[in-house]
């Protein structure tokens, strides 16, 4: 089975011992992404919608670096510091996934690794043939 670690140009350096994504055979595993810019600065301040836009843009970049798109995503996990924000970020999610509907899990957490982050998303995609 082929295994390839993927670092995405334009994304911040990981804050720990991990990479942006790992391709394992026909699957792509995307690490949790938060709303940071290329320098690791939080984007969107206290606005969960602005943060979600940055997170999904970071996800788009990560998928593209591996040759995938949102249509290839089969599973997403969303972590929110306030589960009531789910309805606020749904439109951002729909903008990116369009008609594609991956399996999904939503978890409320007390905090995320980046101070001030309100949303984190990880994903699994199937590599296109």
Image (cartoon, grey):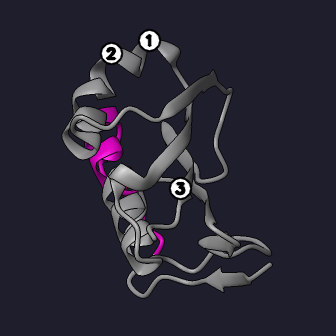
Q: Mark 1 points at which residue?
A: 84
- Ranked by sequence position, the earlier of labels 3 and 2 is 2
**Residue 54, x across and y down, in percent:** 32, 54
Question: How many residues crowd around disc 3 within 10 Å: few (fewer than 14), some, or many (20 or more)?
Answer: many
- Circles 2 and 1: CB atoms closer than 8 Å: yes
- Single out the mark in the foreground, 3 or 1: 3
54 magenta-colored? yes
Q: Residue at x 46, y 35 (%)?
A: 102
Q: Residue at x 19, y 40 (%)?
A: 95
Which label is found at residue 125? 3
**Residue 50, x across and y down, in percent:** 26, 43
User: Which residue of the protein is positioned furthest toward the bottom in this rendering?
Assistant: 9
**Quadrant where the N terminus is found in the figure:** bottom right
45 magenta-colored? yes
**Residue 80 in sight from this viewpoint:** no
In magenta, the rendered stretch is: 40-55
- Ranked by sequence position, the earlier of labels 3 and 1 is 1
Q: Name the residue under label 2.
A: 87
Would you place residue 99 above or below residue 34 in this image? above
- Single out the mark in the foreground, 3 or 2: 3
**Residue 51 in sight from this viewpoint:** yes
CA distance for labels 2 and 1? 7 Å
- Circles 3 and 2: CB atoms closer than 8 Å: no
Q: Residue at x 31, y 28 (%)?
A: 89
């Amino acid at each position: 089975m082929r295994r390839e670690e993927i670092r995405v140009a334009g994304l911040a350096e990981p804050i720990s011992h991990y990479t942006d994504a790992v391709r394992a055979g026909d699957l792509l595993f995307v690490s949790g992404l938060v709303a940071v810019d290329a320098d690791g600065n939080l984007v969107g301040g206290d606005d969960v919608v602005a943060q979600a836009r940055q997170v999904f843009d970071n996800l788009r970049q990560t998928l593209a670096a591996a040759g995938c798109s949102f249509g290839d995503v089969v599973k997403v996990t969303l972590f929110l510091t306030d589960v009531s924000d789910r309805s606020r970020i749904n439109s951002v999610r729909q903008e990116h996934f369009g008609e594609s509907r991956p399996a999904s899990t939503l978890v409320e957490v007390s905090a995320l690794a980046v101070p001030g982050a309100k949303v984190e998303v990880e994903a699994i995609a199937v590599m296109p043939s």
